[in-house]
Image (cartoon, rainbow, N blue to C red):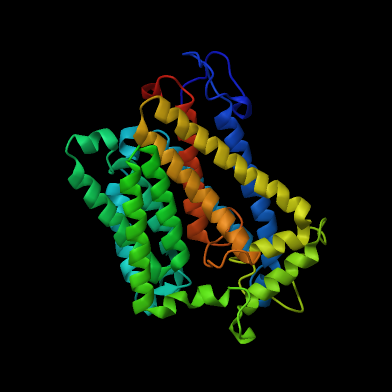
Amino acid sequence: MPKLTGNSYDDMSYKVSGTESDGSGSLSPFTFLCIVLILAFFGLIVLYSASFQTAIERGLPHYYYFVRQLVSAGCALVVGVLISIIPMEYIRKGYVILVPVSIIALAVSLFPQFSGSGHLMIGGYDVVHTGSLALFASVFLASGYIPDSDALGGGRIRDFIISTFAVMVMMVLSLFSAGLSWYVIIGITVLSMLRIKKIHYGVILVSVAAMIAAAAVFVSLFPELLRPVTESMMPVSDGSLYSQSLLLAQHAIQQGGIAGVGLGKGYMVQCRINDQEGLYIFASLVREMGFSGVLFIVIFFLLVLVLGMRAAGRGVRKGDEQTAALAEGLTMMIVLKAFMNMLYVSGVLPLPGILLPFFSYSISEEALNVLAASILYRLIFIMGRRDNAKA
């Protein structure tokens, strides 16, 4: 990466309407890096606290989940560093590989022998979380292949149709493989990227209508797709329909109070939550750190949102809608997953299945999150430079 030159500014006080000199730098990359490292480090601590007892009960070393998550994050970070030396024109074309791989993984995971909690399983091993991979692929497809408004006027309607159709295919496959949550999060992310590319609002509204109609059709044909959602809706007429793990998670959250019961005490011994180290790790986090501790985590994810959106905004002002859309998509990928998990475990949003980035145990999910953060770091750095080509 090039050396920072000129005066630097603090991204938190950066003014959109202000004048940015040609040689100005930005503290945004450093700020973003610190935030992600804090989230990842704190996530590993919470994961160990939530999983060590489960590991012991299963005859595994107490550090089993912690070490596997750490190795996964480390490997993804190495890959992210290697990607940083690849020219951006090739990075933006990552959809060429990601889209077919994602569709194949989604299709294979539809077979019960290869599916497990939204993951593609081969030989009993978690290969990849299909919904997260589809989201990752959709981000690159929408940024690198969907043309902007000017290109649409230049006759690239076919590319727009092909790319949106591919996104819809991945969304529908995700609906069956990973659940309604992933269908929704992919749709929201891609729609936000269409906004960056200045696609006409009429086209966006038609896309929204198509997504809703497709979901309605498939849910009506396969009502079992709604079962995880109905189990998490409060209230329901029959108490037996409640997700017991969700009820226990909310009980753990209530126990946390303002200050929490203390770090390392998030494990509920008497009423153990299934998948406490995965989907419901947020409940363990709140029980240990309380709402005051959770507030800092929420602030950190909001800072990720601010930094990512500002990088996308700079890209738009520089006329680089492709890179801006990629920054927007990766930002939405991380932040939407975080808040959807928190809202679900808290009993506010009945859309289950989303793991908490940098916290929940999942080797493949952790790798994708770290890889996404690594690429986003590079985009934030590039968008802080006046001359993108040198980055």
Give the percent coordinates (x, y) of residue 156.
19, 40
Image: 383 above or below 44:
above
Give the number of callouts: 0
Residue beneath the point at 37% across and 55% down: 208
Which residue appears farthest toward the front when viewing the image? Answer: 202
Residue beneath the point at 73% across and 60% down: 286
Report if residue 335 is visible in the image: yes
Residue beneath the point at 28% across and 36% down: 149
Among the 4 quarters of the image, the one containing residue 57: bottom right
Q: Between residue 301 and residue 116, name the one nearer to us.
A: 301
Give the percent coordinates (x, y) of residue 272.
70, 76
Quadrant occupied by the C terminus:
top left
Image: 25 above or below 280:
above
Image: 380 above or below 65:
above
Q: Is residue 363 left or right of residue 133?
A: right
Report if residue 141 is visible in the image: no
Among the 4 quarters of the image, the one containing residue 132: bottom left
Residue beneath the point at 60% across and 64% down: 344
Q: Between residue 190 and residue 48, name the one nearer to us.
A: 190
Give the percent coordinates (x, y) of residue 55.
65, 71
Image: 213 above or below 315:
below
Give the percent coordinates (x, y) of residue 26.
55, 24
Among the 4 quarters of the image, the one containing residue 360: bottom right
